[in-house]
Image (cartoon, helix red, strand yellow):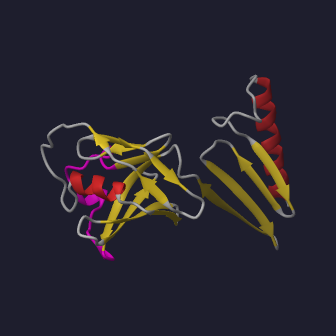
């Protein structure tokens, strides 16, 4: 109970600071501070992409992160084809710097392959479906192709994505390869 009261106190301070700075707390999607009390849960959100849910039941307190997939940079960490791990890992790729193979779902889907930037229109729905339109990309020549993932294949997998899901804090896109095989792309918020 003390932790719940502490969270309420912190939320009140955040609301006070936001109102003193002249920001509109109720309508700004970029600077959201909200406090919701429902039975034994307190939810505090300090930005539009994450929120902490503090639950205090039976004397135990736990904090869970709720992640928005939108307007954040996702970094590709794994590729699975027909259920088989291709062993694509950022740490296993000596020439893959942290900026390659990214995805951001904002007004458009965009990101970076190896080495080209891409953008595409997309739509999502609450049932987890995603539809990515034709991808436009820059046309720089690659000095190397990372092991186990060519840029062309990455763009194809993004374009052919049909379902998204969040599993253990990671964004997963389910897709199809050019040959019809099942593809699962795993993205992390951490580089």
**The stretch drawn in magenta includes residue 66:** no
State which quarter of the image contains the N terminus.
Answer: bottom right
The image quadrant that residue 62 belongs to is bottom right
Residue 92 lies in the magenta-colored region:
yes
Residue 9 to residue 17: above or below: below
Coordinates of residue 91 in the picture (x, y in percent): 28, 57
Q: Position of residue 42 (x, y in %)?
A: 79, 56
Q: Is residue 84 above or below residue 13?
A: below
The part of the chain drawn in magenta is 82-101
Q: Principal SS element in the magenta part? A: loop
Q: Nearer the viewer, residue 17 or 66?
A: 66
Q: Is residue 1 left or right of residue 145?
A: right
Residue 130: percent from left, percent from top: 48, 58
Q: Quadrant of residue 47?
A: top right
Which residue: 35% across, 54% down? 159
Residue at x 20%, y 55% (from the top left corner): 150
Which residue lies at the image location 37% right of the left edge and 65% below the top edge? 175
Q: Position of residue 117 (x, y in %)?
A: 30, 39
Number of marks drawn? 0
Q: Is residue 33 left or right of residue 47?
A: right
């Amino acid at each position: 109970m003390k932790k719940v009261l502490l969270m309420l106190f912190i939320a009140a301070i955040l609301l006070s600071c936001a109102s003193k700075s002249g920001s509109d707390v109720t309508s700004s999607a970029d600077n959201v501070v909200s406090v919701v009390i429902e039975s034994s849960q307190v939810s505090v959100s300090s930005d539009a992409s994450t929120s902490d849910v503090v639950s205090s039941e039976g004397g135990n307190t736990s904090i869970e992160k709720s992640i928005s997939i939108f307007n954040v940079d996702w970094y590709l960490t794994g590729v699975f084809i027909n259920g088989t791990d291709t062993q694509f890992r950022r740490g296993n790729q000596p020439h893959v710097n942290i900026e390659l193979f990214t995805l951001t779902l904002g007004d458009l889907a965009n990101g970076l392959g190896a080495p080209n930037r891409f953008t595409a229109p997309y739509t999502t729905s609450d049932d987890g479906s995603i539809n990515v339109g034709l991808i436009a990309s820059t046309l720089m020549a690659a000095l190397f192709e990372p092991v186990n993932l060519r840029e062309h294949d990455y763009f194809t997998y993004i374009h052919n994505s049909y379902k998204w899901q969040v599993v253990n804090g990671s964004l997963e896109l389910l897709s199809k390869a050019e040959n019809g095989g099942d593809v699962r792309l795993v993205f992390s918020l951490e580089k």
